[in-house]
Amino acid sequence: MRCPAVFLDRDGVIIRDVDLLVRVDQIELLPGAAAAVRRLRDARLPVVIVTNQPVVARGFVTEEEVLALEAVIEQRLRDAGAIVDGFYYCPHHPRATLAEYRLACECRKPRPGMLLRAARELALDLGASTMIGDRPSDIAAGQRAGCRTILVETGMHAAPRIESLDGPAPPATPDHAVPDLAAAVDIVLGTPAKERA
């Protein structure tokens, strides 16, 4: 039996987007993010983070350091009662500084590889799931995976383009656009508008 899930981009959705996250002292949970994740878990919805991490391809951090930074983020969420069920990242980039990461992979958003992998490994129903992100590439990845999509305006939502690695990208118009993760979770959980205020 497959279950619906909520996929979250990390930078600009859960934590403040600092462009190149390479140190623990740069990590700052966005206001209300932990409470929003906690509400999803209280509703028994798995929460899965899917994030492009070109800092690896550019040689700024190693994959082990990405995992260490993620562990700090997840601990801060846990400290606020919020649990993450999965973490998937793409270290690749087609113009990577480091040759071993220089490829047009299936996992880098706007491709849906991370979502597809999570669905296989965690038994998730993509058609009943939601992708929440702050960039057009997040929305495109969610659409390609068959998910409902929600754009939040707490990060790079105004980014002007999708870097397509395999020809024209699908339309990146989200099903919903909202100010922040809390408002996105209202939509996921079907919270009536009068209760959102």
Image (tube, rainbow, N blue to C red):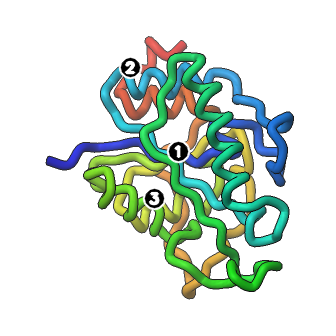
In the rendered view, tell whether residue 7 sits above or below residue 192.
below
Q: What's the distance in space between the residues labelled 1 and 2, CA to CA?
A: 22 Å
| Secondary structure at numbered mark 1 | strand
Query: Which residue corresponds to the image point at 61% horizontal and 28% vertical from the top-left?
Result: 75
Looking at the picture, which amino acid does disc 3 mark? Gly
Residue 79 found in image quarter:
top right
Query: Which residue corresponds to the image point at 82% horizontal and 68% vertical from the top-left?
Result: 59
**For residue 192, which numbered disc appears in the image?**
2
Residues tagged 3 and 2 counted as in contact (Cβ below 8 A) = no
Label 3 neighbourhood size at 10 Å, few (<14), some (14-19), many (20+)?
many
**For residue 28, which numbered disc appears in the image?**
none
Looking at the picture, which amino acid does disc 1 mark? Leu
Mark 1 or 2 closer to N-term? 1
- Horizontal relation, residue 21 to residue 182: left or right: right
| For discs 3 and 1, the disc positioned in front in the rendered view | 1
Residue beneath disc 3 = 142
- Horizontal relation, residue 43 to residue 93: left or right: left
Residue 143 found in image quarter:
bottom left
The answer to whether any part of residue 132 appears in the image is no
**For residue 8, which numbered disc appears in the image?**
1
Mark 3 or 1 closer to N-term? 1
Q: Position of residue 77 (x, y in %)?
A: 59, 26
Count of numbered badges drawn on the protein: 3
Label 1 neighbourhood size at 10 Å, few (<14), some (14-19), many (20+)?
many
